[in-house]
Every structure is written in structure tokens, then in C-alpha cells.
Image (cartoon, rainbow, N blue to C red):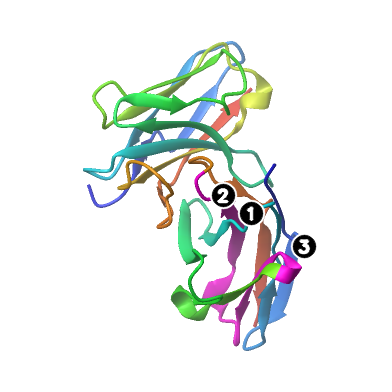
Amino acid sequence: AQSVTQLGSHVSVSEGALVLLRCNYSSSVPPYLFWYVQYPNQGLQLLLKYTSAATLVKGINGFEAEFKKSETSFHLTKPSAHMSDAAEYFCAVSPPNTGNQFYFGTGTSLTVIP
Amino acid sequence: GAGVSQSPRYKVAKRGQDVALRCDPISGHVSLFWYQQALGQGPEFLTYFQNEAQLDKSGLPSDRFFAERPEGSVSTLKIQRTQQEDSAVYLCASSQVGTGFFEDGYTFGSGTRLTVV
């Protein structure tokens, strides 16, 4: 069974500070991993994805994530937070060759303090 | 269209009422998905279409939920005899990929927020 754990349902950072949002997955086979962002009253927008190529993945808006198989993690980072980064962030996994659905974490709400 | 369009954006239904939620995927996208997002939760899979064929409906919570995509484009999610626990945001997503793994992810619509009172 697939599961995704996002540690910390709420994260607050100061503007300009490092953003770190945690995601761990459980899977017998390394899955493909995604981070989505959701702004209020909007759908989910793809930030970045890991699909078994480079383990350090760069996405939009200055975000990046590193796949660490030994830790079963795919944490999302951004060196310097901007006010516009305030949103809900979801980690998702999709096991290769086992189906079409994504399994989402419960989300982390990011607040950026001016 | 340029994106995935869902209507209505908001729907308030009385308990026991039937509702229909519409999704217009991106033109030419083969695959279409419905997800349910309860308050404070991540989206959960409901069902998946490839063209007009419903290939996976394992996530539909009960037989009150029914989805169709008769011509392989627009899809409708119908909920019969709505219950309070059906209150959620219903997200539709589409993908150009027809089979295999969706390594490019989906394009999501803005969702329909259903409130059952």
C-alpha cells in the first residue's frame, strides 16, 4: 500500500528565510514523487516531480526537492521565502506501473511572516 | 480550452438532494480523473477515465456516486441522495497521456465546493 506523510500541517517562516517542507513515503518500490501547490480557491499546480532521473529536482518559483531513497524522503526546499509562497503544499506519490492514481499527503500550510 | 474548467464553483445542496458536477478537461486530453478533497485533507482518488471508458472507479465511496464521460471529453460526477459527509471540494484533473504512468502529472481544475446542509 502506498502512503505519504507530510510532517507538520502548518509551517511558518519569515520572509527571506529557508523553507523546508517534509515528505516521507512508504513504498516497496521507489515511486514517482510530486509536489503540488494550492492557492486559496484554486486547483493544484505542479511544482516539481521526480521520475527516477536526477535525485535533485528543480521546480518552478525557486523550489527544489531531493529524493533520498535511504530515507524514503522527498523534502521540498526554497532558499528564501517570499510572501507569495504562502499556500498549501501537497506531496504526492504514484507507483510506477501499478495504476493511474496519485496518493496525496494531508498537506502543509505555509505561512510567510513579513 | 486553456485549462480544466469545473462548474459550478460552489454548490449548496440539501441533504437527500441529487447533484451533478461538471468537468471540461483540456481539449485533446485522453485521461480524466476525479478526486475528493475533504476539509484539511489531501485529495483522494475517486475515479479515472481513459477517453469514454471508466477504467477505475475503486475510489467511489458508495453507489450513490456515479461518473460518466460519454463522448470522451466532458465528464459529470453525480451524487445521489447527498449526505453531510459528502461535503468536500471535488477536483477534476486531466492528462494528455492515455496509458501508463502519468509522469508529467495532471492539470487540475479549480474544483467544485459542495456543501450539504
The chain that hosts pointer 2 is A
Q: Which residue is mark 3?
A: A7
Q: Which residue is mark 2?
A: A95
The residue carrying pointer 2 sits among few (fewer than 14), some (14 to 19) or many (20 or more) residues within 10 Å by Cα, namely many
Circle 1 — which element?
loop
**Of the residues tagged 3 and 2, which is closer to the observer?**
2
Residue B53 vertical placement versus B15 (above, below): below
Callouts 3 and 2 on one subunit: yes
Q: CA distance from mark 3 to mark 2?
A: 21 Å
Circles 2 and 1: CB distance less than 8 Å? yes
Left or right of A105? Residue B67 is: left
Q: Disc number at residue B66?
A: none
Check if residue A89 falls in the magenta segment. Answer: yes
**Residue type for callout 3:** Leu
Q: Earlier in the sequence, mark 3 or mark 2?
A: 3
Which of B40/A34 is in front?
Answer: A34
The chain that hosts pointer 1 is A
**Residue type for callout 1:** Val
Q: Which residue is mark 1?
A: A29
Q: For residue A77, which quarter of the picture?
A: bottom right
Check if residue B63 falls in the magenta segment. Answer: no
Q: CA distance from mark 3 to mark 1?
A: 22 Å
Q: Which residues are magenta?
A: A70-97
